[in-house]
Amino acid sequence: MQKKSRELLAILQDNEFHSGEEIGRQLKVTRAAVWKMIQTLQQTGFLITAISRRGYRLEQSFEFLSQQKILECLSDNLRKQIKLLEIFDVIDSTNTYLLQQIHNYATIPRVCIAEMQTEGRGRHNRKWYSPYAQNIYLSLLWRLPSHQISSHVIPLITALSIVEVIETLNLPGIIQLKWPNDVYFSGKKIAGVLVEMTMESNSHAQVIIGIGLNVNMRNTTDEINSWTSLYKILKKDLNRNSLIAALLERCIANLEVYQVKGFGYFQKKWHRYDLFLGKKVQLQCHDLMINGISHGVDHEGRLVIGTRKKKNSMFSVGEIL
Ligand code: BTN
């Protein structure tokens, strides 16, 4: 997003009419250039009306990501605990950025958020659609003793934390979890988790927990037609700053519980939302294709599949197709 477009959005943020002339004067560009920028914002998904002789008006409540607002919503404890919270306007990927910062131990736990990602990454080398100022693209750098973790469990804990946050919004429908890391709402994907980690001298592991949550996105491209956003469900814009604070609270609280109690503590809760519990599944695990009935997850977060040949098999990696 160009700097001028951000400035334009800042002008329109008050939901009042602003003439092309007035905007042009403030941004030091021509009226034609203003019109072009308005069109770009509209294409991005912003609802802006243009009325001759009155100008342009943003028809939705909108707030930029703000460090101060996020910190204000955090508990005192977490505010003190988080060493660094950075917000970027545009970044390639918040996960990639934190991967580059992984050895900066003094600043862990550390959070990186962006208005837009140009190379947002999903699991299995997929792209994560990251349009400007609509959704949440958040990565948390966390460090924990390696004997306390099973890497495959962190995505499950994170997906559950997202569910706990969006549950508080009283959505009219069913929130579901698709093992290991997808959050669905009434059959459409609303959030995903990408966890990356490095081990260090057998004692500690640095974990980067990337969360993509579709918040105020109105338009979805064909590519992501099977997706939804909180706006699409609730028909209203939500405040991303307070949602980010809530996500951080839940994730960090759950990671701490997990470190003490293990995944067993979350098993029942997972089953409450499990999209495939008791259903036929096809799991792709490396080159293998496993068909069977899903029996949910075991106390270590592994997917349990009952196949014809063997009663139950457990999987800690793979993708349900
Ligand atoms: C998936 O469902 O495949 C996981 C998507 C994870 C997307 C988030 S957005 C913030 C962080 N940065 C990235 O590049 N990816 C994750």
Image (cartoon, helix red, strand yellow):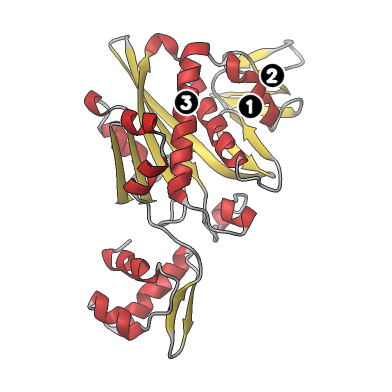
Residue highlighted by disc 1: 283
Instruction: Please give the name of the residue rendered at 53% of the width and 32% of the height, measured from the top-left corner.
Output: 161
Q: Position of residue 138 (x, y in %)?
A: 40, 41
Foreground: 242 or 277?
242
From the image, which quarter does the N terminus lie in?
A: bottom left
Q: Vertical placement of 156 versus 184: above or below? A: above
Rounded to the nearest whole Å, what is the CA distance between mark 2 and mark 3?
Answer: 30 Å
Give the quarter of the image for residue 38: bottom left
Whether tag 2 and tag 1 are in contact, CB under 8 A, the answer is yes
Q: Which of the two labelled residues, at mark 2 and mark 1, occupies the earlier sequence position?
A: 1
Q: Nearer the viewer, residue 227 or 282?
A: 227
Farthest residue toward the bottom? 53
Q: Secondary structure at mark 3?
A: helix
Image check: 116 left or right of 158?
Answer: left
Q: Residue furthest front?
A: 76
Where residue 216 sits: x, y (%)? 52, 56
Which sits earlier in the primary sequence, circle 2 or circle 3? 3
Circle number at residue 103 = none
Q: Secondary structure at mark 2?
A: strand
Using the rendered view, name the quadrant where residue 285 is placed.
top right
Q: Position of residue 235 (x, y in %)?
A: 62, 59
Residue denoted by label 2: 305
Residue 117 seen from this side: no
Q: Which residue is mark 3?
A: 253
Which SS class for mark 1? strand
How far is mark 2 from mark 1, CA to CA? 9 Å
Tell me how many marks there are. 3
Residue 120 can be seen, yes or no = yes
